Amino acid sequence: MTEFPAQTSLRSDLLDQETAAPARPALRVVHETDGIDLAAAEAAAGRFLDALGISTESESLRGTPGRMARAYAELFSPRPFDLTTFPNDEGYDELVLARRIPVRTVCEHHLLPVVGVAHVGYLPGARILGLSKLARVVEYFACRPQVQERLTKQVADWLQTHLEPKGVGVVIEAEHSCMTLRGVQATGSDTLTSTLLGLLRSDARSRGEFLALTRVTP
């Protein structure tokens, strides 16, 4: 019996679905901690303020140790997420770049805020990444006492390991309160760090394109 073209196409599609490789499960990313003891942190914060000569007896300051404890617990607790990736079916081989991802972390030397933006890009390999996950990876490594140099490299290395792209680039621009509010009091200064891996490091054209799009002069 002669089959109509539509039937042939439908059967071909069904066969392709049956023989296609199963979808890769998303990687669940959870920050491992030893547990947060808010009561102990609140008591310690109260003693800290008292040692600095700051009384917490007034109505407005009475709850400050607890607020301090909860604030730092939030700063050190990244939200869990699923690293969802998808087949690069179209063979897209140009740069994927998410610019101005918010960064907020805490300087590990003074426990003062570091606030800025991250530009994160990659050259796809066999798989592409859900774009929101670039911001999630930045948050994951920022939610702990940090130095900017390490944070930049951790984000890049993690993406290179788990996504296996042809190249990864990370640039972070941030203002450090430990520089602007104390010590040298360099108000308005910011710090820029970068990590380039794979083709974004070895290929001059790719490196130049990434830096130009992040508006960083090579």
Image (cartoon, rainbow, N blue to C red):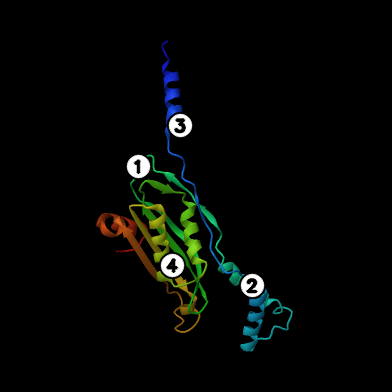
Is 59 drawn above or below residue 211 in the view shown?
A: below
Front tag of 1 and 3: 3
Q: CA distance from mark 1 to mark 4?
A: 30 Å
**Mark pair 1, 3: CA separation:** 22 Å
First in sequence, mark 3 or 2: give its number: 3
> Looking at numbered disc 4 in the image, what kind of residue is underneath it?
Leu
Which of the two discs, 2 and 1, labels the residue nearer the N terminus? 2
Q: Position of residue 25 (x, y in %)?
A: 49, 47
Helix, strand or loop under label 3:
helix
Local crowd size for mark 1, using a 10 Å CA cut-off: few (<14), some (14–19), many (≥20): few
Marks 4 and 3, how far apart at CA: 43 Å
Query: Considering the image in quadrants, where does the C terminus appear?
Result: bottom left
Q: Mark 1 sits on what residue?
A: 91
Looking at the image, residue 208 lies above or below residue 129:
below
* First of labels 1, 3 by sequence position: 3
Question: Pointer 2 and pointer 4: residues touching (CB < 8 Å)?
Answer: no
- Left or right of 153 in this view: 26: right
x, y percentage for residue 124?
A: 36, 49
If you read the primary sequence from the N terminus, does the residue marked by circle 1 or circle 4 appear first? 1
Q: CA distance from mark 2 to mark 1?
A: 49 Å
Location of mark 3 (residue): 18
Q: Amino acid at mark 1?
A: Gly
Q: Earlier in the sequence, mark 2 or mark 4?
A: 2
Residue 119 location, quadrant: bottom left
Query: Which mark lies nearer to you, 4 or 3?
Result: 3
Viewer-proximal residue among 42 and 58: 42
Contact between marks 3 and 2 (CB within 8 A): the answer is no
Classify mark 2: residues with Cα within 10 Å, few (<14), some (14-19) or many (20+): few
Q: Residue at x 63, y 74 (%)?
A: 69
Residues at marks 2 and 4, CA–CA distance in whole angstroms = 26 Å
Residue denoted by label 4: 151
Marker disc for residue 37: 2
